[in-house]
Image (spheres, helix red, strand yellow):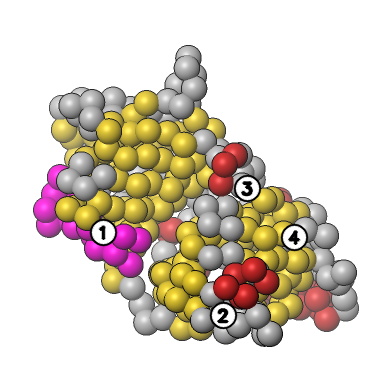
Amino acid sequence: MAMQNSKQNSNKTYRQVDKIHAAPRPHWVGDGFHVNPMFNHMVGDKRTDPFLMLDYAAKQYFEPNAQAPRGVGQHPHKGFETVTIAYAGEVSHRDSSGGGGTIKTGDVQWMTAGNGVIHEEFHSPEFSQAGGDFSMVQLWVNLPAKDKATPAKYQHLANDDMPLVSLHDDEGLHAGQVKVIAGEFTPTINAKAPQQGDNKARGIGTTFTPINLWDISIEPNRSIEVAISRSHNLLLLSMQGDVIINSDHDQQAHANQLITFEIESGDTGEDFVRLTAGKAGAKILLMSGEPINEPVVGYGPFVMNSQAEIRQAILDFNAGKFGDIQ
């Protein structure tokens, strides 16, 4: 039986699109990140839970600037996680938990702010010396109330360490690939698992709540299908090319657009999403996760559950409880 917000097709149900959102006007974060703010928690849209915010820096050329690397200086966070995905260029990170390093093209950094952290992010010295194309995504992921006091930590996810799954269309032809950053990718009839005898690819990023973060590339004029748990909310960021969703030509997304999907009733089982690339192929970031369903109160770099907790976060930061970058 079809879900209220799914469409039945043969023995499958397909998750239905809520809206295709055009990219908002871009703005600068520091002097190194020219981003489109695709969504944020201040709007209060339940369809994005457990994700709080997404900034997309589409590809842009930066001139060499070795004397003064561009970026964002020291600033605090508390109560959530930041996930930075490098599509072109390099970013160097340092934080007060002792975490840090440089992510290069294809790498991901996953910082848990938890009970409070101070960090900075700049174009790497090597990238600043050479200049070049730069493109990044930064995603904020909420933490449930019970985990907001967890100690800060840093994960460096190297491109070569993340599972890569080959995708096939209905005729068995190569149709694209999925890089599994976090969560679990279960191949459907359109996909082929990367390890012999293992029908699941598992991302190396660790999460506090069930989340899937998949980087998807689709070949020109090819179609792929992915399965999503009905307990998850679902978002797609279209970064390159055009993509038709669920074979519905009225639901076509272009580059620099966000697709939100209808909320399911939470039944067990899976829905499917069918994605068909245009003549130039398509590149998509898929985000799905179980909603936390808790109050979200944000103030700048802090995201908590109440105004009282926000006030305490400000007091803790001013008292130096977030530590120092060494």
**Disc 2 and disc 3 in contact, CB within 8 angstroms:** no
Query: How far is mark 4 from mark 2, CA to CA?
Result: 23 Å
Q: Is residue 222 above or below residue 69?
A: above
Q: Amino acid at mark 2?
A: Pro
- Camera-side residue of 274 and 90: 90
Query: How far is mark 3 from mark 1, CA to CA?
Result: 26 Å
- Label 1 sits on residue: 241
**Disc 4 and disc 2 in contact, CB within 8 angstroms:** no
- Label 4 sits on residue: 100
Q: Is residue 92 above or below residue 109?
A: below
**Residue 41: image x %, image y %?**
50, 68
Q: Residues within 10 Å of mark 4 (few under 14, many from 20)?
A: many
Q: Quadrant of the N terminus?
A: top left
Q: Is residue 58 above or below residue 179?
A: below
Residue 48 shown in magenta: no
Number of the front mark, 2 or 3 = 2
**Residue 278: image x %, image y %?**
18, 53
Residue 247 shown in magenta: yes
- Camera-side residue of 285 and 232: 285
Query: How far is mark 2 from mark 3, CA to CA?
Result: 27 Å
Reading the chain from its start, which is encountered first: label 4 or label 2?
Answer: 2
Our reading of the magenta stretch's main secondary structure is strand
Q: Secondary structure at mark 4?
A: strand
Residue 182 occupies quadrant? top right
Reading the chain from its start, which is encountered first: label 3 or label 1?
Answer: 3
Residue 65 occupies quadrant? bottom right
- Label 3 sits on residue: 157
Q: Which residues are magenta?
A: 239-256
